[in-house]
Amino acid sequence: MFKGMYNWIDERLDVTPMWRDIADHEVPEHVNPAHHFSAFVYCFGGLTFFITVIQILSGMFLTMYYVPDIINAYYSVDYLQHQVAFGVIVRGMHHWGASLVIVMMFLHTLRVFFTGSYKAPREMNWVVGMLIFFVMLGLGFTGYLLPWDNKAYFATKVGMEIAGSVPWIGGYIKELLQGGTIVGAQTLTRFFAIHVFFLPGVLLTLLAAHFFMIRKQGISGPL
């Protein structure tokens, strides 16, 4: 049945050459762990992407139960944690994955730097990678407030003070993120919108550009 469906789609869209082009793409020998043990350091980027996919999928599950207002936010997380089947596992994956993805991205960045992979002709991909790094940090910061407990509240207040200390534009950044003069209902709503809609949209766009350039330019060789 599935073969018949595939053939029907392939006859109309000619998808076979597209996936064959990806599947038949040769992996350079220096990034193949079967040939070089040091090639494992080239896996950090793929592992970062794998964890990012887990974060997206687990986050989609969490949004089905989370209520982004100051009255119900904490109780919705508590309900998810203790009443929903496998909720504690999914939230744990999302919670620890948020830290792990930063660690893996940092290791990936170190690998790129120390192997000189940021040099010509890959400077643009280095810039895109740095933008992805900052987006990930933004996702971590905005997601930290969502449980709306004491730790999240006061940590966000510290973050707001740091943002407000930026010369010239700090006050505008602080007010934009807070939605007012205090960390309150507007802040939670804005952080939820930024965390679930704005930053993921930017992230997916940057990832598409990142992978396109990798596919176009290939994986850089060792020093």
Image (spheres, rainbow, N blue to C red):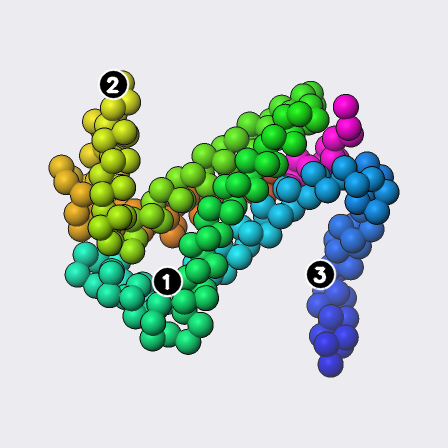
* Residue contact at pointers 1 and 3, CB within 8 angstroms: no
Identify which residue is drawn at 58% across, 46% down: 48
Q: Give the side of residue 76 with respect to residue 6, left or right.
A: left
Identify which residue is drawn at 21% across, 58% down: 69
Give the residues drawn in magenta, as a range.
Answer: 211-223
Q: What residue is shown with label 1?
A: 63
Q: Quadrant of the N terminus?
A: bottom right
Label 2 crowd bin: few (<14), some (14–19), many (20+), radius 10 Å: few
Q: Disc 1 residue type? A: Thr
On the question of residue 164 being in view, the answer is yes
Question: Percent position (x, y) of residue 207?
Answer: 56, 42
Identify which residue is drawn at 49% across, 52% down: 97
Q: Which mark is residue 13?
A: 3
Question: Percent position (x, y) of residue 77?
Answer: 30, 63
How far, Cα to Cα, is label 1 from label 2? 36 Å
- Foreground label between 1 and 3: 1
Magenta span includes 59: no
Q: Disc 3 residue type? A: Leu
How far, Cα to Cα, is label 1 from label 3? 34 Å
Q: Is residue 131 above or below residue 153?
A: above
Q: What residue is shown with label 2?
A: 168
Q: Is residue 27 above or below residue 63?
A: above
Q: SS at mark 3?
A: helix
